[in-house]
Amino acid sequence: MSRYRGPATLISSDGAEIEVYVDLRAKQREWSGTVTIDDFDDAGSPDRTLRLPDGREGQVTLGGSAAWSDVVTLVGSGPPPFA
């Protein structure tokens, strides 16, 4: 199992970027994890690009979060950018 914890950038389909903290895990061909987003606004498409500090990118779909939490689940598609 491969893992990455640290800073990243989430990029929306309109190009807006937000700095986040992620905790990601890859197991075989699947990867997922959580992303901490201050003042998360779930409006718009849940599909985003995740960019790591070294420039590698992956496609993610954001899930839900509890009303009181800034931690959001995510599921990656394609190869993990941290493996």
Image (tube, grey):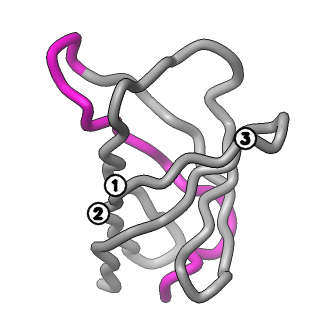
Q: Disc 3, disc 1: CB below 8 Å? A: no
* Label at residue 33: 1
Give the CA distance from mark 2 to mark 1.
6 Å
Which SS does the magenta portion mostly show? loop
Of 74 and 26, which appears nearest the observer?
Answer: 74
Position of 9 relative to 69 (above/below): below
Q: The magenta stretch spans which residues?
A: 66-83
Q: Give the residue type that dot 1 points to.
A: Gly
Q: Disc 3, disc 2: CB below 8 Å? A: no
Q: Give the residue type that dot 3 points to.
A: Ala
**Residue 44 x, y percent position in the rendering:** 69, 17
At mark 3, the secondary structure is loop
At mark 2, the secondary structure is strand
Q: Nearer the viewer, mark 3 or mark 2?
A: 3
Q: Which residue is mark 3?
A: 16
Q: Residue at x 22, y 11 (%)?
A: 67
Position of 7 relative to 77 (above/below): below
